[in-house]
Amino acid sequence: MLDKNPQTGGEGSASAIETDVVIVGAGPVGLFAVFELGLLDVKAHVIDILDKVGGQCAELYPEKPIYDIPGLPIVTGQQLTDQLMEQIKPFGANFHLGERIDVLKREGERFRLVTDAGTTFLTTVVVIAAGGGSFTPKRPPLEGIEGFEGKSVFYSVRKIAEFMDKDVLIVGGGDSALDWTLNLQPVARSVTLLHRRDDFRGAPHSVEKMRQLVADGKMKLAIGQVSALHGQDGWLDAVTIKAKDGTEQRLPITAMLPFFGLTMKLGPIADWGLNLEENLIPVDTEKFETSEPGIFAIGDINTYPGKLKLILSGFHEAALMAQKAHQYVYPGKKVLFQYTTSSSNLQKKLGVR
Amino acid sequence: MAKITFIQPDGTSNVVEAEPGVTVMEAAKLNEIPGIEAECGGACACATCHVYVDEAWRDKTGKPAEMEEDMLDFAFDVRDESRLSCQIKVTEDLDGLVLRVPAKQY
Ligand SMILES: Cc1cc2nc3c(=O)[nH]c(=O)nc-3n(C[C@H](O)[C@H](O)[C@H](O)COP(=O)(O)OP(=O)(O)OC[C@H]3O[C@@H](n4cnc5c(N)ncnc54)[C@H](O)[C@@H]3O)c2cc1C
Ligand code: FES
């Protein structure tokens, strides 16, 4: 079910994926929306720029405990994510991970959404469950770094072969830094890993492999921090590295990959013509609909009088949103209010009957 | 109460009164100190509450624990005097504490 880039269609192409609802964001609230919509026979596609589901819970605090989920006295971020995935399984939502929704526009009665990878959706309803916005790599606060981005400073690798003739500097001490060191080392002209201390929190077997490559003279390990970038027109030719004792040294390199974790940035949502209040989307508290009919916003991304950025509030918002979304998908059809405990109809959908 | 001074990169400073038991990050946020982002709300999961502890106070604030040291890998221009302010608990002992805020968290 967790297919990466399952279908790719260019904008305007006939291969748009048609669906009832597109959910932007696979955080806890987007995931629970699949459940509430599913009970009402509304089918959803879920898109997230992360390569995993769970939003903040999975990315920022997978191992940390949450104490205020009703009925679960203690649950970690990853456990909650896993349980939500289990709960929504019967509804067979389609996931598109590692893709960011860049474009959202009205097209007749429906909406067209396009990801950065070109995947296109045609949908009746849009549910924005984008939390604090897209997870985006942190940019080191080095002077002039913006000018090098995309040409010689990269936060992710799309094509390994592009680094074939590069002297690559990888910065960081976690799994991303180590994994890319190991992946690029056989390809790049040279690889140097730079970390602020000679201690790595990444997976021990990756650390071991890296140390062996250093011992064999196949790559370099440097301890220190980048303090300046040098180069022209976006092309790096060297960086200054500051050691712990304050001494500085110039290292010639032609590409840099910094890995300092992720932060949430509103991103493309700002360009969708929605009303925004301090980077949040105002909604009503009956249906959690935005200023645009058919576009809903639930979870951390929305705002209304009394809003609390809590997972449980997002769950409630998802339930009420689903009622109205159902009306758009099945115009004129009445929803009979039912309990999952007693409704054989709902239990059939859940696959427990 | 403990007085804590936050010195900004431009030299200006703010003194806040912090209640023992809260974290230094919380004291900073309650008083809207610029430059302390604290995106994760104190869970030691973001490294955007990075501060430099004044030389004279380094013994009293102590060294980062292992989890904090790991998270400091996500901060920039990390020094011996670096701490994540959400991991420093305010005590009466810290009355007078002086901290520097980095030029940018990221
Ligand atoms: C350390 C920490 C501890 C917390 N503890 C608690 C707690 O104890 N109790 C509690 O209730 N809450 C807690 N929270 C808050 C809770 O995690 C959030 O309220 C919750 O994650 C919000 O869920 P969400 O689904 O709205 O958004 P998020 O979890 O933020 O997920 C949104 C997702 O949308 C994606 N996205 C955004 N824009 C796009 C786009 N254009 N295209 C594709 N994908 C996009 C993002 O990449 C992200 O994965 C905590 C938060 C943190 C950081
Ligand atoms: S507030 Fe996030 S690490 Fe301190």
Image: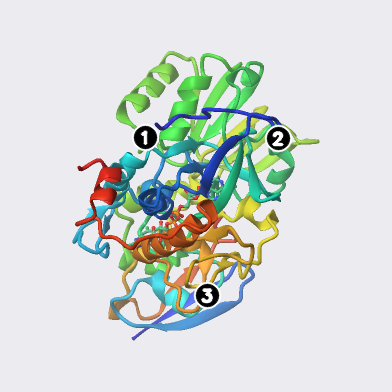
The residue labelled by disc 2 is A11
Q: Does any atom of ligand 1 lie closer than 8 Å to the CB of label 2?
A: no
Task: Tell me what residue is drawn at x 68 percent, y 44 percent.
Answer: A145
Where does the image place residue A229, in percent across and percent down from the top left?
68, 40
Q: Secondary structure at mark 2?
A: loop
Both on one chain, marks 1 and 2?
yes
Amino acid type for the residue under numbered disc 1 = Gly
Q: CA distance from mark 2 to mark 3?
A: 45 Å
Residue beneath label 3, please? B33
The type of residue carrying mark 3 is: Ile
Q: Considering only order in the chain, which callout, 2 or 1, is on the residue closer to the N terminus?
A: 2
The location of residue A251, given as percent across then percent down, is 63, 31
Give the CA distance from mark 1 to mark 3: 33 Å
| Quarter of the figure with residue B24 | bottom left
Mark closer to the observer (2, 3): 2
**The N terminus of chain A, quarter of image:** top left
In this image, A1 relative to A265: left or right?
left
